[in-house]
Image (cartoon, coloured by chain):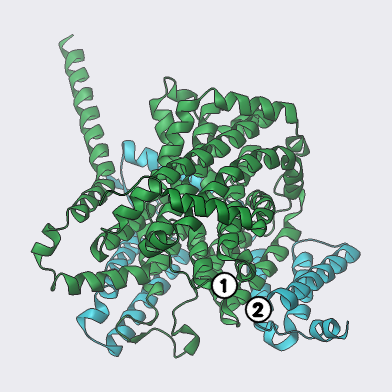
Chain colours: A green, B cyan
Amino acid sequence: MEQPVIDWQALQSSLHLLGSSYSAWLLTIPGIALGMLGGAIPGVSSALILAIVLPATLWMSLLSSLIFMTAIYTGAAFGVAIPAILMGVPGSPAAVATSFDGYPMTQRGEHNLALGLALAASTLGHMGAYLILFFGIGIISHAVLKLGPLEMLLLMLWGLTLIAALRGRYVSRSLVSGLIGILIATIGLSPRDVIRGTFDLPELLDGVPVVPAMIGLFAASELFNLAGTSYLVSRSDLRTVRIGEIARGMIEALRHPIVILRGLVIGATIGGLPGVGAAVCNLVSYAETRRGDKHPESFGKGNPKGVIAAESGNASSEAGSMATLLALGIPGGASSAVMLAALSLHDVTSGPQFLDTSKDVVYAIILNNFVQGAIMLALGLGLIGLMANVIRIPVRILIPVILVLATFGSYGLSGNMAGPLTMVVFGLLGWLMQRHDYSVPACVVGLILGGKVEANLLQTYQISGGWQFSYFAGRPIAMVLLLLLLFSLFSRPIMQWWKRQRAASAAALQENKAKSA
Amino acid sequence: MSRERDHVPDWEHLLFAALLLAFIVWYLWTAAAASLTFSNLILIAPVGAVAAVLLLYIASVEIFGRVATTGVSSVQTDAAAGTAHSRFRSGSLATIAALMGLFGAFVLAIPYIGFDVATFLFVGATLWLLGERHIVVLLSLALGIAVALSLAALTLLTFPMPMAVARAVWSSL
């Protein structure tokens, strides 16, 4: 049966839901503000803020909790750009590419302009990607029902390999990180009721608590690294804020609709791939804009288009990861993994069934996110001055406060000391990994996906009758996914080899010409 | 292509890689001992084996040095590495180690001295460690954060957090 693009009945129901849920609206503004403030502190990722507020969502309705969390996500997507622009230190890996041109603009005294560019690009990227989600969610809900354990397995493997390939300094170390994450995720009672690696601790029978482990890996390890530094921002003149200049930057961003459009399409699609976070969207959008520009050499030296591309890429990845989270039940990144935990706190399992039965909730989230974009624009303008003050707080105060908050959050999640203890152990592991260039995000994605990979692998093995080829041949989506997976793994080395060959032959040709001349 | 000259192995990294390898071997061993069936080892055996091989490769590169390559790939890798590393500004190792020790002690102490007292002591000690020498600022911040979070724990969390004095004070109000 043909699936309608928009389910009007569900849309009407979602409007009723939003109209009757005052708490959801009341939580939107503090959510965005919290996300922006947290995101503006380097080392504090949206995943950490979400993990800290996760216990509080127990007291909210499902819709309110999801809206509160997406509001934090939205705010943090812009918040991380502030330190990236002002001092070249991204608030999180999601703003790495933002710093490439944002910081040189600051060095030229154009930081207000750059902040305006980032704010407008973030807002437009966010709203545009949710628009894609609004029209695409019906198609997604229809398409995902065709996905079996084999396709899910391939999607998860793709997410893992993309992160491992793109994130780290050394590919081998990033792969080890991801693989260790997978192994840690399988600790506890297996799908076949075998107890593995629990150290005889009953607390580990359910597996390693994922969110406290994630807080430890991300936050504790970054905060340990900041110990001994005095201020995040040392030059006070970087913190002067002129609203007029910021507004001028916002108008300037509107002059580059193609850059924004490219960023939001990349964010909405790549952000939707499991295991691929805002960091990848940020980098890919930046790289594609640079490659397509007439003056690629001007990038990295304060080209406004670089800031716009990077920010529209990372802000739009939220909608992509929400599509994957709601339609497939797979976290697109660490932040949506915490949202998955919020869903489970409300005894809801996201995935095709959820999308089918609760489309009104999904539409309500999308519609609220359009409004979130407008609120972010207003709040961003007003709060930039305040956020600069947050960066003025000495590191010696930020570190203990955030560590205590994280301990509080992880105790609230586990209900016993297992959460905080897990955080300490994984904080140490994360710091050691970061120190030796083992990709922490790859490990986190392995940790999140490992259990599901094993369950889907076992199911595929059973359904396929022990790896019968006819089963694989009869699943065209799986074949396409496999080809895409192989392409993403091998296209770069093949291209590099081809470029080297071409350069070598060109050099040989020139040498011959020179000789004959 | 040639081996890098004057290569000095990073022994700390080698120790870390050895610890990761030991974890993998131990985990595979205990999993196989629990059940030596295909369904039990379907994922962890290949994943563990690949991770172990990669770690051995990483260790060999660390000991014997990397094969130096030229061209596009090495230039790109160096650029990416520079970017990744410029994100972090690290303090002294002693300060980081002390901070880790304090954080571990804080978490371990919660069941014995309560979250309220542990938070007060941890925040105070960390502020001192990281250079806060104004005693009034130090004490008021430690007390303020301990009171605020203990109050949040008493009112927000469904699971009772171990407390030394906060619960008694809260219920007497």
Determine the secondary structure under disc 1. Answer: helix
Residue at horizontal 34%, vertical 48%? A139
Distance from the alpha carbon under mark 1 to that under mark 2: 9 Å
Residue A398 quadrant: bottom right
User: What type is the residue that disc 2 sits on?
Assistant: Val
Measured as percent of width and height from the top left, residue A323 is found at 42, 52
Q: Relative to A75, say whether B9 is above or below.
A: below
Horizontal side of residue A398 vs B147, given as left or right: left
What count of labels does the image hold?
2
Residue at horizontal 64%, vertical 42%? A376
Q: Tell me, yes or no, if residue A502 can be seen here.
A: yes
User: What type is the residue that disc 1 sits on?
Assistant: Met
Measured as percent of width and height from the top left, residue B63 is found at 36, 61
Measured as percent of width and height from the top left, residue A128 is found at 49, 38
> Where does label 2 land, which residue?
B107
Q: Tell me, yes or no, if residue B86 can be seen here.
A: no
Q: Relative to A325, say whether B74 is above or below.
A: above
